Amino acid sequence: MAAVSVLLVATGVHAQVLLSDDFETSLTNTPASTTNPVWSGSLTEFAISSSPTISPLAGSSSLASYTHNSEDNIYTTYNAGTSNVNMVWRLLYKNTGSTTDSADPNNGKRSWNFWLAANGSNPTTCYGYYLTERQGVLYLRRYNGGTTNLASFTLTNNTTYSIKVTRRGSDGLWVLYVDAGTGEATTSRGSTNNQEVATTGTLYTILLSNDKNEPNTFLFDNYSISQASATLGCTTAGLASSSYLFSGDVNKAVHSFQLTYIEDLPIKQLTIYSSGALNNGQISSFSLVKSTNTTYGDGDDVTLTATDFTGNNNGSNFRFDNNNTNGYLLSGTSSATTVYFFLVLNLSSTFVNTSMTSTFSMSSANSSLVFSANNSINMAAYSCTGNTYSFGKLFDWYGNADLISGSPDLRWSSNKNWVLNGNTGSIPGAAPTQYDKVRIASINYVNSSRQPLVDASTTIAGLEYGSLSTSPTFTLNSGITVTVNGDVSNGNTAAALAGSGTLAIGGNFTNSSSATFTTNRTSASSQNTISFTSSSAQTITNSNTSTTPSVVLGNLTFSGGGTKTFAAGGYYSVSPYSTVTLSGSTIVSIPSSTTHLQLLTGTTTPFLTYAQIATIPTGSSIQGNIDYQVYFQGGSLFYRNYRAMAAPVYSGSYSASNGSYSLASLKNTFIITGLNGSANGFDKSTNNGATLRTYNPATNNYTFITSLNTLPTVASGQGFYMYYRGNNIAKPNATVNDPYGAKTNSTLGAGGNTYATPEAVTYTYTGVPNQGDVSAATLPNGSNYFYFIANPYAATLDANAVIAASNISLFTWTWDPVSGTYAVYDSSTPAASTHGAKRYIVPGQGFFVKNSNTSGSSKTLKITEAMKSTGNSASAVRLLSTGAPSVAAEPPVIRLQFYKNASVRDELGIVLSSVAKDSLDAGDAAHLNGDYLNLTSITPDNQYLTIDKRPFKGTRIIVPLFINVAADSIYTFKKTYLSPVMSNYKVTLYDSLLNNKVEITNIDYSFNVYRAKPETFGGKRFKLIIEQLPAPVTFFEFKGKLNGDKKGLLTWQTNRYRLGTTYQVQRAPDTTNFTDIGLAQVGVDTTGKGSYQLVDSTIQQGNNYYRLVQTDVFGNKSYSNKVMINLSSAVGPVDVKNGFKLYPNPVVTGFSILSDKSYTGKVSFRIYNSNSEIKISGSFTQLNAFESVKQDVSQLKLGVYFIELRDANNKVLTTLKFIKQ
C-alpha cells in the first residue's frame, strides 16, 4: 500500500506520526525516516514478501515471518516525547496458517508478540505493552514482571484484520479496536486503565515471532504509531464582508478558527473572547457552525446543536460546553484533518450602544480550547486575534423635522428626520454617526418630496437605498463629503445622488438586479464624485445586466491602495464631463468581459467633452477592459474622407508595456472595405476601395491594409488612417454587391453619381486602457523623417509636453478631414497655428511629428502619463471642423487663407521674428499636401512652408506664395488672423498676373484659376509685401503743473491705440538738454480716449522744462510741445526741517542749502559725524530767502553726517542730516 501521509510543517501540527511503515521497501531503509524506519535484529528471519509468494494485505508487499523454528525478533525505536499524550497504534494482521500455540514464541512454538511500547530491545527482559495471538485469540497485554490481559478478541485464520490500539494520555485507558478488513478499526473489543509501565521518552517496538519453519504464516502491514495532536489558528476567510454590524443583523459570521489535528480530538469546551462593551442586550442569539472549508454559508455547514454544545454568553466571551464524559469528538486518523468553525451572531434590533467596537480572539493562555477529562493532546501554544467590528444602529430617513421659516427642514443633521430600525415612534437623540448605517427609502417618508440634504460633511458606517418608490435622492452640495466606512448598496429603481459633493466609500458597492443608481453630472463644475478609498480590497457589483448603464457616474476616484474589483456583469458609465482618477498604488481590476465600464463622449463640436483617465501614478494600474467612446462628426459629404485615428486602448490582457489594437474591431461599427472584398475579410462593395492605411516614415509612403483575415493591429501610440463613410447600417438603395448602397458606390446615389452623406458616429474602443510610458517611435540620428504617432491615452494630451521632452520639431501636423489638408500647431508661436490646430490633442487622434534628433545616437520618442492634461479638454479640438485659436501671441503674426468654400481651404501662417532666418530653419513648418488645394510660402532656398518665420529687415519684406488647385473655380485670399502688433505693419497682396495690389488685412481678394492656364497658379503669380506702418501721433493735451506736494505733475491724453507704442517724459533745465525721467509708459488699448500722468518727484528749483516722446515699435519718435514748471515760491519736495532744505541727498561732492527766510549777519555751521566728531566748520556771510548756498564736502569719507546752522546770536537754527557717498 501507499505510505502513510504525514502532515508536518505545512499545517502546523507538531509531533504527529511517530513511526509508519508500509513494508513496501527493505527493512534497512536508507535514508531512515519516520515513515521508513530502520529495523534491527534477526532481519534474515523476516521477509518483505509480495505476490505470487503471498497475497499482500495492502499495497504490493507485506512483512512476513520467514522460516524459523526458534524465537527471532526485529525492532526499531521511536520517541514518544515527555508527556503522556494520547497515542494510537495501527496495523493490519493475518494468520495464513494453523491456530497459534498458547505459549510465547520460543523454540517449537507457533506464536508471535508485537511489542507496541517497550523499554528495551530484548523481548525476553523488557517491560511494556504488546499484542499477541494465542490459540486464535488476539490479546492486548501489559508485562511488568507479570502479564496482565487488557483486552482480547477471537480471530479467524486466513482473515485480514485491522487493529487499532489507543492509550489515553492522563489516566492510561487502553482500548483495543479490531475489525475484519483493511479499513479503520472502530469496534472496541475491550479496555483497561493501566499506567504502570512508562510510555514516554525513547521506546522500542519489537516483533518477536516463531513460525515453526512455515514461511509467510504471519503477515503484518501498515504499521504506524501516532500521537493525538492539534493546532489552532484564527482566520478571516468567510467572515462578514463588512467590519460594521448593525442592530437587527442576522447570520453574521464574526470569528473563524481552524483546527488541524491528528487522531481523535475530544473537545470539552470552546471559548471565543470579545473585547469592548459587547453585551447580552446587543446579541439576540449566537451559534457555532462547523465547516470543511473557509466559506460560511455554503452547503457543507453544520450548525452545532445543544446536544453538541451548550452556548453561554456573558458579554465578554462566547463559551460552548459539552457535558458528555467524552466531550464533543472530532474523529481523526493518523493523517491531518482540518475543520473550520464560525461564530455566528444574530443582533438585537433594539440595542442602544453605538459607540462601540469589539475584537474577537482565542489563546491558549485563556484556555480557549479545553479537552475532555483524562485526555492529553499534543498542542502548541496559540494566540490569535480575528477581526474587529463596529456595532451601530440602523437609521431610516423619515423627513419629519419641524418647519424652518415655513419650509421643510431637510437637514441630514436634524435628528427628527430619522427613526431607528423602521420604527416611526423611535426617534434617535442625534443624527447618524460613524458607527451607524443609514437607509433611505426603506420606509415611507412623511412626504415623498422630503429628500435628505447633507448640510455638513459627515461619516457613517453604511448606506442603503431601499426599494420603495420614492425616487430616493440625497444632495451633497459643493465641498460636502459623506464618508461611508462600510458598504453602500442600492435596491431602488431610481436612486440618485445630487449636488456636487463627494460620496467616499470605504467598503463595497452593490447595485441590485433591477436597480439604477445615478449621480449628478450636469457639467464639469457641477457633478458628484464617487470615491473608493479603502486600503483593503473593494468590490463593485452591478447585478443589473441591462445594456443601458444602470450605474451612471460623474467623477470616479480610486485611492488608498489595494485592488478595486468590478465584479462580473453590469454596465457603468462615466459622464463626458468627468475624470477617472487613481492614486496611492491602487489597482482597478475589471476581470470579466461581461462588465462594461463606459467612458462617454459628448457630441457637440468643435469643443467636445469626453470622459478621461487622469495621470496614473507609478504603482497604480487599470487591469481589464473599458469601453471608451470617440465621436466622429458627420452630416456633410465633406466628412467623407480619411480620419487620422488612434486607439486609446489595446486588445487582450493587461500588460505593463501596453499592446496593440485589432483593426478588425472597426468593422463592428464602420464600413471597412479593401482588396478582394469579403475574401480578405472586408465588407463587400463593388469598388473594394482601401479603407485602412498606416504610414512608413523611412519610405514616406502609406501602407494599405490588404486583409483583415491576417488580424492586423496597430501598436499603442501609433496612428492610422480610416476612410470614413459613416456607420455600417445599410441604405435603402443597397444591392447584393453593395450592401451599403451609395455609401460605397456613387452610382446608387442621387442622380446616379452621388455618394451618401456619412452620419455622425460614436465609436466604442473596447480594451485595456493604454497607461504608463508609451514608446511611439525610434528617432534615428540626423534624419528628417515624419512619424505618424498618436495620443495613446484616454485623456487629453499636451503637445507642448511631448515636443519639449522629445527630439522632434516644434510642430504637430494633424489631418483635417473637412478641408482635406493638415492643421499645423506651432508650439513656439501658437497664434501662427493653421486650421484651428491647438496645443491639446484629444483621445483617439493621430498626428504627425518631425524628427530633429542630432544627438549622435538614436532616441526613443516616449509619451508619458505626465503629458496628460485632463483639465484642458475644452481647449482641444478633434479637427472635424475648424476654429481660430483663442490665444493671441506677442510676435507679429498673420494667417492667410486660400479659400474656395467653407470646406475647401488651406491656410498659411507668417511670423515676423528677429531671430528667424530667410531660409528654412527649425522654426519653420513644412507643408504637407492636401486633397483639394494648397497654399504655401516659398523661401529663398526654395522650401514650401505652411508656417514661415521671417526676419523683418529694413522697411519691408516680400514673401512669394505658391498655390495649387484640383479644379477650375473662383478662389479667394482672406486674412483669418492678425496679431495685435501687426497693426504696425501694412500687408499687401500683389497679383502679378493682373497687376493688382490689395491691402489684404482689410479686404478679401478673389480671382479665377484655370488648370489649363499655368500662369493662373503656381509660385510666380502672388506675393505678400509686408511694410512698416509708422505710428501716427496718438497723444494730445500734454500739460504740466505743481501738485499739492510741490512736485511736478505731467498729464496727457491719447485718442487712438497702436500696440507697442510707448510714452516717455523728458525734463531739461533749459529748452534743449532733455533727459528721461521716470519709466516709459506703454500705451493702453482703449476704445475711446486714454489718460496718462507722471509725477516728477525730483523737480528742481527754478524753471523745469518738460516734453513727451512717443516711440513706435520701429523706433520712430514723435515729440510733444514743451511745458514749463517753475519751483520758486516755496521750498521743494525734498526733506525740509525748520524751513531749511539740503539737496541733493545723498551727497557726492557737495550740497546746497536753501532757506524760506532771509537771515542777516553771519550764519555759522559745523559738520560732524555720527560719533559727534566735528569734521568741517565755517560760515556763510548771510542767507537770502530761496537763494541757495553751496558747501563742498568732497574730503569727507563715506557715511552719515549732520550739519548744524547757527545765527549771528549763536542760536541754533536747524540740524540737517545727509549721507556722503
Image: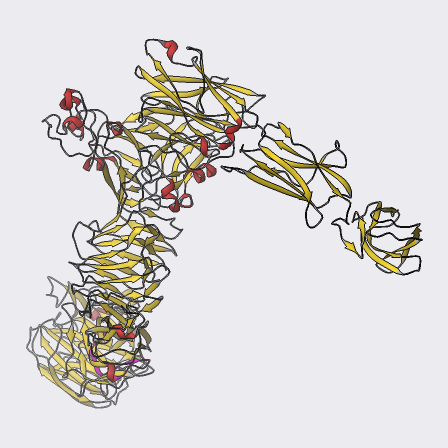
Q: Position of residue 1221 (x, y in %)?
A: 80, 48
Q: Quadrant of residue 146?
A: bottom left
Q: Main secondary structure of the magenta part?
A: strand
For this view, does 1004 lie left or right of residue 1030?
A: left
Residue 264 highlighted magenta (yes or no): yes
Q: In this view, does 130 lie above or below 842?
A: below
For this view, does 843 lie left or right of residue 105?
A: right
Quadrant housing the N terminus: bottom left
Q: Where is residue 311 in the image (x, y as percent from the top left)?
A: 20, 84
Q: Position of residue 753 (x, y in %)?
A: 17, 20
User: Is residue 257 visible from the viewing direction of this image?
Assistant: no
Relative depth, front residue between 361 and 936: 936
Q: Which residue is drawn at 22% across and 61% down?
A: 510
Q: Give the range drawn in magenta.
A: 257-279
For this view, does 825 lie left or right of residue 80?
A: right
Relative depth, front residue between 1096 and 1045: 1045
Q: Where is residue 805 in the image (x, y as percent from the top left)?
A: 47, 39
Q: Which residue is drawn at 25% across and 58% down?
A: 540
Residue 190 highlighted magenta (yes or no): no
